[in-house]
Each structure stands twice: as C-alpha cells, then as structure tokens.
Image: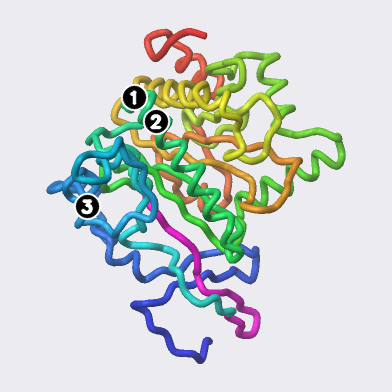
Amino acid sequence: MFSREFEVESKAELRRDPVIGRWVIISPQRAARPQEFDTRPRRIRHGPCPFCPGNESLTPPAILAKHGPPESSGEGPWKVRVIPNKYPALVDCQDMSINSGIYCGRSAIGCHEVLIETPRHVQSLSELKQDEVRDVLDVLILRLGMLKTDKRLQYAMVFKNVGPTAGASIEHTHSQIMATPIIPDVVEAELAGARSFFESHQGCIYCRIIEEEMLIRERVVTLSPHFVVICPFASRFPFETWLLPREHTWRFEEMGKDCRVEFLVVLQETIERLEKALPGTGYNLILHNAPLRDEVPFYHWHIELLPSTSRPAGFEWGRGIHINSVFPEFAAQTLRDPRFGSVD
C-alpha cells in the first residue's frame, strides 16, 4: 500500500500496471463532469451552449484563438478557439515520481484542451465551409508546434468524440488535444511494429499497406492524388475507416501547404460518407501522429475514424480480440456508394 496521503480533489496521477506495463490516468477532477456516473444512455446536454459566441464566460479563457478582421471596437470576432478543458484529465503541476515496491507512476502533468472549430452552432466537421476548416487546421498545427516546446511532454493526441454514443456531451463541433509526458501504449505498439518492419524489410509498413490496398482496391473508399481512405483489412469495428497520406511522412504538422486543401476535402467527404451511411451513429476520430520531438522515419501518420455501432463486451475486454460483424470489404463498398459522396 502507499503510505503517502492524497489530496484527491487537486491531484491526478499516471499509474503503470506492473504486469503488462499499461498506463492509466487517475483523475478525480473528471468525476465532476455532468453525467460522469450516470448509468443512463449518454445524452447531449441542453441549455446555453458554452462554445457559442456570447457564452465565453462559461469556459476558461482561451489559450489560442484565430480572429476575423479587426473591427472599429478592436479585435475581430473569433473564428477558432483553443481553451483548457473545464474538467481536465491532465494538469499543469510539478512532475513527481511515485515508487512503492513493485508499483510506479508519476504526476499526470500535461495539457487537456478543447479546440472549438467554429462559432457557428453546427454538429459536424463536414458542415464547415472550406475557409472554416482551413482555419481549424492552421490553429491545430500552430498549437502542436507550441506544445512541442514544452520538454516535459512527449506526445500530443488529437481526437474528436461525435455524438453521445461516442462520449460527446456537447454537440457544437469541437476536438480535444491531450498532451502527455508519456507515449500512449497504442502508439508505442504502433511505433514498435513499424520499426520492426522497417528493420526487416527496409520500408514502411503503412506504405506497404497502401500499395496492397491500391492493388486490390476492394477496401479502398477514396483515392486522391495525395491521400487514400480505406477500411482496414483487420477492422476492429464495423465501418472502421483510415485516412493515410500516400507519400511517406511521419509528422502530421509537417504536411505541405499544397496538400492541406486536398486533405481537408478528403477528410470532410469521408466524414460525410460515414454520417450518411450510418445516420445517427456517433464516432471517434483519432490522429495517430509521431511523438512531439522524436525522429521516427519508420512511422506514418494517419487518421482513424471509429463509428460507435457497438460497445466492447466481456470477450473483447477479457481476450483483447474484437468481434466485428461487418466485413471491411462490404463496408468500403457501401461507403463508395455514389449516394454517400462524390465518385473519384
């Protein structure tokens, strides 16, 4: 047992499982979230939207914002805002190690932020105009660059929860950024697998996946000059979808400006296809990126879209093996349907 005392209300910790090395964040602050211990199906909160203009007092002050043209009264209205999460899982505190016998951990230092993508009250990134989504990308890349300067942090995860079944409680379209002092387990596993393939085959496993998928075509959803969208061969979830750059590159924020417009078009179209094929279904969008400062030439950034059509149950938790009721070949064929988007 730990002999030290806890200030439960003010501290968060990263603890490591001594058997398999899995990291867990213990964050009592999160218990204050609305619906945190509500066993009923999660619902979107009603009342004033804290992300709409005029309600800025309902959120912490902005860390970063992009504004429109200046007005006579001063700064123009905001177009994109980055704010601290009101109920952060990670906190800016002193970094302390925790060691007791076989147990180890550390303070859960880091950043947990919300990127409000537009002042307009819309529910999906697919509803944003091209200039709006371009502003979102510009702000995101700028913020990732800022986080890279904090030597305490190793990884910044960018993700979206869309819809109550995917964990969202506010419908106004937004993303989250969580920067941690560790590299998450899933990313560590991806890096290890990519490094192993690179060392044994002198190439990138993701580039090889792209080559295979473009040759077979049955799991390809969209193919553009610089990007490909696929339903992966070993999809864990029905209609799981990946977006990958066709050119080998391991760091998302170093995407060339000539590719950014194309990337945004492909991303919005992919989201629209999923939303039309699975109406009312929530989903999670996760950016798999290189660590903040490490040079990992064997890696390949990509985006995963995971519809929340079902929840993991006993077998998935007990064995770590997902049961998927939809072949990815069928999912890709469905998403290619002209009714759900333009034909490439």
Whole-percent x, y for residue 111 in the image:
46, 60
Residues 237 and 247: in front is 247
Tell me where the magenta segment starts and ends, as one range: 98-114
- Residue designated by label 1: 129
Whole-percent x, y for residue 276 in the image:
34, 20
Whole-percent x, y for residue 220 in the image:
58, 18
- Magenta stretch containing residue 82, yes or no? no
Closer to the chain start, of discs 1 and 3, is 3
Q: CA distance from mark 2 to mark 1?
A: 6 Å
Closer to the chain start, of discs 3 and 2, is 3
- Magenta stretch containing residue 103, yes or no? yes
Q: Are marks 2 and 1 in contact (CB under 8 Å)?
A: yes
At x 41%, y 68%, the residue is 27
- Residue designated by label 2: 133
Callout 3 amino acid: Glu
Q: Main secondary structure of the magenta part?
A: strand
Q: Which mark is residue 72?
A: none
In the displayed structure, would residue 318 be above or below residue 99? Answer: above
Position of residue 269 in the picture relative to residue 182 (left or right): left
Q: Secondary structure at mark 2?
A: helix
Q: CA distance from mark 1 to mark 3?
A: 23 Å
Position of residue 245 in the picture relative to residue 92 (left or right): right
Callout 2 amino acid: Val
At x 39%, y 44%, the residue is 175
- Residue designated by label 3: 56
**Quadrant assignment, res 36:** bottom left
